[in-house]
Image: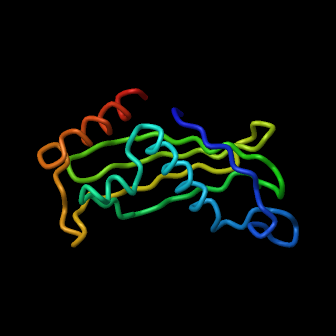
């Protein structure tokens, strides 16, 4: 996987056994995706100022092994598929020792603020080019 975000598991993200609650993996995915886009030069706030939103269409998570309190996990992500008005992102979460904790994916649309689809290649060619480079680097 291309991009890596390091995240320390916080106490409030765990249950009484010190295991990360399943709902937090989606937050970890979002953190990694946001940082990946920022590093590529497409921070969400700049996209929104340009009139492009990226609503979540779906999220999938498969849990393999638990992540634990105070552990620094690695969340890897990459653009798996880029289409005209949407994209898919793949994720992998690994513990400090390298064990696979979770895998997943998310799908996102490109829309305007009224949630009407935006054909990125035609309407935002500069942004589309950045996404295209990100997808092809895999």
Q: Is residue 47 left or right of residue 61?
A: left
Which residue in the rendered view is the most extreme toward the top?
137
Q: Residue at x 43, y 29 (%)?
A: 138
Q: Is 33 in front, or is 61?
A: 33
Q: Residue at x 36, y 34 (%)?
A: 135
On the image, which quarter does residue 55 sit in? Answer: bottom left
On the image, which quarter does residue 98 sit in? Answer: top right
Q: How is colour applied across the structure in the image?
A: rainbow
Estimate the x, y position of residue 107 in percent, counting from the top left.
Answer: 38, 56
Which residue in the rendered view is the most extreme toward the left?
122
Q: Residue at x 28, y 53 (%)?
A: 86
Estimate the x, y position of residue 119 in percent, counting from the top left.
Answer: 16, 52
Estimate the x, y position of residue 88 in percent, counting from the top left.
Answer: 38, 49
Q: Residue at x 26, y 42 (%)?
A: 127
Up-down: is 15 above or below 32?
Answer: below
Q: Is residue 117 left or right of residue 79?
A: left
Estimate the x, y position of residue 85 in percent, counting from the top left.
Answer: 22, 53
On the image, which quarter does residue 129 sit in? Answer: top left
Q: Is residue 117 left or right of residue 41?
A: left
The number of callouts visible is 0
Q: Is residue 43 left or right of residue 52?
A: right
């Amino acid at each position: 996987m291309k991009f890596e975000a390091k995240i320390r598991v916080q106490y409030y993200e765990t249950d009484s056994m010190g295991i990360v609650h399943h709902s937090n993996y989606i937050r970890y995915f979002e953190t990694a995706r946001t940082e990946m886009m920022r590093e590529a030069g497409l921070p969400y706030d700049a996209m929104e100022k340009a009139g492009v939103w990226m609503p979540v269409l779906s999220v999938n998570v498969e849990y393999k092994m638990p992540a634990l309190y105070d552990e620094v996990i690695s969340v890897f992500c990459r653009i798996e598929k880029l289409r005209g008005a949407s994209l898919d992102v793949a994720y992998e979460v690994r513990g400090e020792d390298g064990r696979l904790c979770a895998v997943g994916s998310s799908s996102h649309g490109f829309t305007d603020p009224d949630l009407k689809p935006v054909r990125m290649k035609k309407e935002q060619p500069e942004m589309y080019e950045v996404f295209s480079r990100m997808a092809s680097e895999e």
